[in-house]
């Protein structure tokens, strides 16, 4: 039978920005508050992951590269590759952040509902995003513009 926390069963839910921040710090992540509802989380390699904590969900976004960094003649092929890869890297997926229309970014994203978010879900999502960074860079590297040698 379900017992409420008042009856002696302590249930850990990560349903506030403060509880998420405390949890991440306890697990060794470097966490900074960027804006009111945005946390910048860095793993042991210093890779920044942005967490947007809303009323109902937490959204994760990791910047991979600018769309303009891709070879324009091969951009469509790159998009096809990352869309195809979306079926393989669940629960994480590729997206395009167009917050700044002059600097659209290719990102890895995920989101979780806050209502019953437990620590295992949070760790799974973080691990998934960070593990997929290497996959993403391997996938995108053939499509980057050639660098000039001066």
Image: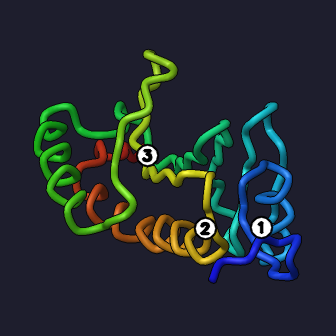
Q: Residue at x 41, y 68 (%)?
A: 132
The C terminus is located in which quarter? top left
| Scheme of image coloration | rainbow
Mark 2 in CB contact with mark 1 (< 8 angstroms): yes
Query: Which residue of the protein is positioned furthest toward the front in this rendering?
Result: 1
Q: Give the secondary structure at mark 3.
A: strand
The N terminus is located in which quarter? bottom right
Residue 24 image label: 1
Query: Dividing the picture into quarters, in which one does residue 145 lie?
Result: top left
Please name whichever residue, 144 or 54, is drawn nearer the observer in this view of the structure.
54
Q: Residues within 10 Å of mark 1 (few under 14, many from 20)?
A: many
The answer to whether 118 is drawn above or below residue 63 in the figure is: below
Q: Position of residue 106 (x, y in %)?
A: 39, 41
The residue beneath circle 2 is 122
Please name whichever residue, 29 or 116, is drawn nearer the observer in this view of the structure.
116
Q: Position of residue 82 (x, y in %)?
A: 23, 52
Alpha carbon distance from label 2 to label 1: 9 Å
The residue beneath circle 3 is 107
Query: Dividing the picture into quarters, in which one does residue 135 lie?
Result: bottom left
Q: Position of residue 47 (x, y in %)?
A: 63, 61
Q: Residue at x 80, y 68 (%)?
A: 23
N-terminal-most mark, 2 or 1? 1
Q: Give the secondary structure at mark 1.
A: helix
Alpha carbon distance from label 3 to label 2: 19 Å
Left or right of 118 on screen, residue 97:
left
Please name whichever residue, 55 or 20, is drawn nearer the observer in this view of the structure.
55
């Amino acid at each position: 039978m379900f017992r409420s926390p008042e009856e002696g069963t302590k249930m850990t839910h990560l349903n506030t920005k403060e509880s998420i921040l405390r949890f991440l710090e306890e697990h060794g992540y470097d966490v900074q508050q960027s804006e009111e509802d945005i946390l910048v989380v860095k793993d042991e390699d210093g890779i920044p992951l942005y967490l947007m904590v809303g009323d109902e969900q937490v959204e994760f976004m990791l910047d991979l590269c600018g769309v303009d960094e891709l070879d324009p003649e091969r951009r469509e092929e790159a998009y096809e590759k990352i869309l195809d890869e979306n079926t393989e890297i669940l629960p994480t997926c590729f997206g395009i952040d167009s917050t700044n229309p002059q600097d659209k970014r290719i990102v890895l994203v995920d989101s979780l509902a806050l209502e019953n978010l437990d620590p295992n879900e949070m760790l799974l999502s973080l691990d998934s995003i960070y593990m997929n960074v290497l996959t993403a860079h391997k996938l995108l590297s053939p499509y980057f513009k050639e660098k000039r040698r001066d």
